[in-house]
Image: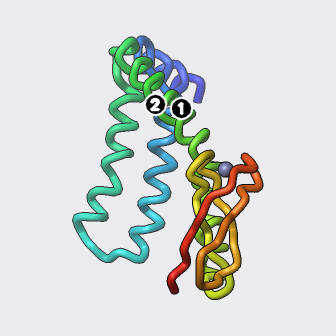
Amino acid sequence: MSNFRQKFMEFMYGRYGNDKLNIALFVLWLILSFVNIFVHNIFFWMFTYVPVALGIYRFLSKNSYKRSQENQKFMVLFSKFLSWLPRARAWCSLQLRKCKDFKTHRYLKCPYCKATVRVPNKKGKHTICCPKCREDFHKNILF
Ligand SMILES: [Zn+2]
C-alpha cells in the first residue's frame, strides 16, 4: 500500500492538485447529476460530466500559476454571489408578501429614498408619508 502511495506522490509531484474551484465543480456535478434524474436527455447527461472533466484537468495540471489565477477569480465571483444572496432572499420574500395581500394592499416605491411602502388598497388620491425618510408623496390609485 505504501508503494502505491509512493507512486501516487511521484505522479502528483509538480501537479496543481485540489482547490476550492475544484470542490465547486464537484458540487456542480452533484447538482447536475441530481437534475439528470428528472431530465431524460442524453446530451444533458453528457453535459453533467463537463465539470468533472474540467476538475480532473485542473487537478492534474502542471501550470499551477494559471490554475491558482482561475481559483482566485472564482473566489472573487463566489464572494460576490454570497453578498448578493441576502438581497435576493429579501426580494423573494417581498414578492411573496405582495402576492399574499395583493387584494388588500399596494406596495409603492418612495420617490425620495426608493424604500418600499405598503399602503391599503383604496381608490382615489392619497398622500403617503414615507416611514423611512418622512417625506410626503402623492399617489392616485385608479383601480
Ligand atoms: Zn422615503
Work out how far the residue at label 2 is from the one at label 1, CA to CA, in angstroms: 8 Å
User: Residue 28, which numbered label?
Assistant: none
What residue is shown at x 37% (from left), y 29% (from top)?
58
**Which mark is first along the chain, 1 or 2?**
1
Which residue is disc 1 drawn over?
Answer: 20
Image position of 7 with respect to 80: above or below: above
Count of all numbered marks drawn on residues in the image: 2
Left of 91 or right of it: where is 34?
Answer: left
Q: What residue type is labelled 1?
A: Lys
Q: What residue is drawn where x is 64% and y is 72%?
A: 126
User: Which residue lies at the image location 51% right of the left edge and 49% below the top edge?
Assistant: 27
Camera-side residue of 17 and 2: 17
Q: Do the residues labelled 2 and 1 touch (CB within 8 Å)?
A: yes
Q: In which quarter of the image is the N terminus?
A: top right
Q: How crowded is mark 1: few (under 14 residues within 10 Å), some or many (20 or more)?
A: few
Q: Which amino acid does label 2 sit on?
A: Phe
Indicate which disc residue 74 carries: 2
The picture places residue 67, in percent across and down from the top left corner, at: 39, 21
SS at circle 2: helix
User: x and y percent of residue 119 in the render?
Assistant: 69, 72
Q: Residue at x 59, y 24 (%)?
A: 2
